[in-house]
Image (cartoon, helix red, strand yellow):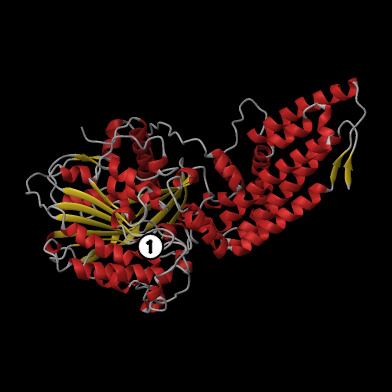
């Protein structure tokens, strides 16, 4: 037994316990880095040591939060805290809450590559509507059993050593109450300073952004912080701050958002179909990577490759987010997610401009297709707010024989069902589809096992299946009367885990396919210079249809030869800015780095160190976006009056 005696024995015991947990968090940080080291190739040994030192500040805040009840039970100046019952209760609380913190850190070992940031408080809202959480949990345990083993081992050691700790009761009397009362107040003082990151009046509670003090690039912040801290600091909805970099007149020139189309052309009442493909990152598309492996790279989407050759595509196309719930508002509403998913933010109830609502003014019928159980990911709620009339999900499909056992209906049968349902819509119509089979746990139907290439990572086989589902959909749809009069837009929802080194960086983590296909063959070719993003889809489609009413859009027409577009995304506390063949990393105040993606795919030559001539131009456009985005959401000004 390890005994703690005297009037300060309780303080010594608490300090010992917290020190052990802090040491454990450092080990967990090292493990997190080693598991994901391919995503942090530029962290040198010296910087990593600084990260470990800085990380203790964030670990202390998280550990204090997690152990606040335990600290209270051990430091409150009452004599019965030395009883056996009190010991059992306090030790149980210590084990339980710290086990949660340890588990959260371990989960991010494997979840981080999908989001490129630590899990945040939005995770609770994100999965609030899922009715298969138990199945997801079981699937997680099966796929990542080794993490369960590590967790069980840590928990076992924590229980064993905690049981060996003993708090000896001191002699009661006025000295006991005086000393313990003073130490209790001092503990409260230390606690407040620990969770705030200091005691100075000017010190604000530390946030994720403070981790930037210990890294050379915002991309490395996730190594500094820990998952419990990330969750605690993001539990409250983010509130944007108004920005005034430019006057209204200057902003209208730099970044206009009210689009006034040329009404000289007649409106083309084409049907519009959006096909949003889960995890179809650009890395996996052979037609978009002809420069890899000396032209021998084939990718895993042969049908998509053939469709791209008949479409208008872009070499530099990017997602506006890293999660599925970021994609819908970006593509259909034209509102990207900055800081947190837009649909989970306090601004999600703002009045917005959506593709569905604008086309309904022209008599369009609107529908949305997603094979998951209704309510999953909050899609049904979002589409309703976006003005989409009909929702087709797993409930409407009503055949569990095609249920994948996890997320919803397999893509192939659901897309066949979608073709039939679209046939019933009144033309002109707007329909949108969101796939799901190319998602973790990365499986294919039994009858297709061994049919598609296994590839280099588990994602590749289900990508091949979803690509085949697309092929089958187009085969069926092409025989229907509405097909020839339909503009198809295909976009990935986001990129995901990348295998090739060329894509294991921030640009690669947002690179996706976006292309426009019109069966009559008027849209063919690839733009190898212009940048396009998901929020550009709305104005591009509307302008192609010669939409003749003014509307609000954060994006711009990708087919406009007179305008050079840019793309913006946000990951934690930094922004990614893409324009032409350049990538700028921006911290919200100033550029941090600029790279030429044509000449420097591995981001080794920071052009800012060479007085890059376009740095000011890029910085102005980035700040114009921030001002327009923040102020528009704050003022609920997302429509053209």
- The image quadrant that residue 627 belongs to is top left
Q: Is residue 53 above or below residue 582?
A: above
Q: Is residue 240 above or below residue 598?
A: above
Residue shown at 50%/35% (left/top)? 236
Residue shown at 56%/49% (left/top)? 221
The image position of residue 89, as x and y in percent, is 74, 39
The image position of residue 276, as x and y in percent, is 31, 57
- The image quadrant that residue 16 belongs to is top right
* Nearest the eye: 538 or 588: 538
- The image quadrant that residue 143 belongs to is bottom right
* Nearest the eye: 543 or 84: 84
Callout 1 secondary element:
loop
Q: Is residue 29 visible?
A: yes
The image position of residue 211, as x and y in percent, is 59, 44
Residue projecting furthest to the top: 174
**Left or right: 515 in relation to 494:** left
Residue shown at 39%/57% (left/top)? 494
Residue position marked by numbered label 1 in the rendering: 403
**Left or right: 282 in relation to 571:** left
* Nearest the eye: 422 or 118: 422
Residue shown at 75%/51% (left/top)? 158
- In the rendered image, the quadrant that contains the C terminus is top left
Q: Is residue 197 visible?
A: no
Classed neighbour count for the residue bearing mark 1: other residues with Cα under 10 Å, few (<14), some (14–19), many (≥20): many
Residue projecting furthest to the right: 171
The image position of residue 55, as x and y in percent, is 65, 47
* Nearest the eye: 482 or 326: 482
Q: Is residue 208 above or below residue 452?
A: above
């Amino acid at each position: 037994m390890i005994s703690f005696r005297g009037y300060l024995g309780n303080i010594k015991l608490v300090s010992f316990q917290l020190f052990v947990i802090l040491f454990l968090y450092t080990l967990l940080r090292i493990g997190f880095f080693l598991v994901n080291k391919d995503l942090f190739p530029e962290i040198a040994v010296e910087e990593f040591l600084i990260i470990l030192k800085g990380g203790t500040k964030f670990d202390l805040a998280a550990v204090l939060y997690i152990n606040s009840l335990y600290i209270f039970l051990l430091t409150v100046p009452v004599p019965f805290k030395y009883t056996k019952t009190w010991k059992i209760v306090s030790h149980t609380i210590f084990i339980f809450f710290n086990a949660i913190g340890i588990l959260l850190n371990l989960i991010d070992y494997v979840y981080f590559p999908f989001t490129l940031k630590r899990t945040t408080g939005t995770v609770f809202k994100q999965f609030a509507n899922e009715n298969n959480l138990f199945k997801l949990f079981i699937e997680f345990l099966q796929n990542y059993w080794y993490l369960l083993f590590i967790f069980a081992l840590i928990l076992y050691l924590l229980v064993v050593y905690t049981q060996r700790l003993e708090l000896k009761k001191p002699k009661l009397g006025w000295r006991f109450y005086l000393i313990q009362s003073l130490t209790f107040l001092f503990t409260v003082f230390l606690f407040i300073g620990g969770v705030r990151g200091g005691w100075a009046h000017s010190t604000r509670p530390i946030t994720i952004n403070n981790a930037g003090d210990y890294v050379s690039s915002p991309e490395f912040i996730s190594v500094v912080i820990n998952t419990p801290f990330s969750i605690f600091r993001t539990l409250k909805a983010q509130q944007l701050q108004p920005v005034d970099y430019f006057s209204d007149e200057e902003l209208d020139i730099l970044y206009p958002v009210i689009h006034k189309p040329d009404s000289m052309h007649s409106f083309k009442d084409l049907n519009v179909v959006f096909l949003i493909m889960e995890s179809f990152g650009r890395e996996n598309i052979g037609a978009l990577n002809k420069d890899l492996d000396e032209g021998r790279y084939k990718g895993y989407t042969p049908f998509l490759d053939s469709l791209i050759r008949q479409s208008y595509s872009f070499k530099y196309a990017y997602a506006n987010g890293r999660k599925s719930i970021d994609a819908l508002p970006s593509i259909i509403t034209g509102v990207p997610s900055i800081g947190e998913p837009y649909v989970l933010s306090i601004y999600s109830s703002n009045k917005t401009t959506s593709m569905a609502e604008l086309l309904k003014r022209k008599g369009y019928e609107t529908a949305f297709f997603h094979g998951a159980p209704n309510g999953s990911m909050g899609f049904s709620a979002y589409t309703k707010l976006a003005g989409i009339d009909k929702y087709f999900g797993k409930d409407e499909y009503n055949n569990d024989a095609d249920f994948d056992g996890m997320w919803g209906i397999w893509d192939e049968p659901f897309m066949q069902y979608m073709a039939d349902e679209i046939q019933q819509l009144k033309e002109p119509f707007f329909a949108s589809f969101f796939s799901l089979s190319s998602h973790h746990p990365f499986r294919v139907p039994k009858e297709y096992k061994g049919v598609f290439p296994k590839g280099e990572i588990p994602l590749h086989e289900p990508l091949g299946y979803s690509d085949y589902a697309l092929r089958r959909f187009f085969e069926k749809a092409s025989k229907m009367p509405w097909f020839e009069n339909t503009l198809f837009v295909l976009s990935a929802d986001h990129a995901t885990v990348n295998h090739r080194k060329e894509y294991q960086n921030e640009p690669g983590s947002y690179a996706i396919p976006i292309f426009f296909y019109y069966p009559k063959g008027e849209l063919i070719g690839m733009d190898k210079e212009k940048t396009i993003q998901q929020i550009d889809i709305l104005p591009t489609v509307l302008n192609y249809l010669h939409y003749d009413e003014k509307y609000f859009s954060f994006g711009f027409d990708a087919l406009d030869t007179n305008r050079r577009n840019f793309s913006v995304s946000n990951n934690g506390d930094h922004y990614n800015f893409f324009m032409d063949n350049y990538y700028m990393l921006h911290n919200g105040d100033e550029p941090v780095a600029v790279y030429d993606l044509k000449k420097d795919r591995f981001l080794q030559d920071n052009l800012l160190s060479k007085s890059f001539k376009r740095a000011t131009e890029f910085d102005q456009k980035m700040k114009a976006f921030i001002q327009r985005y923040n102020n528009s959401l704050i003022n609920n000004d997302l429509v053209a009056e």
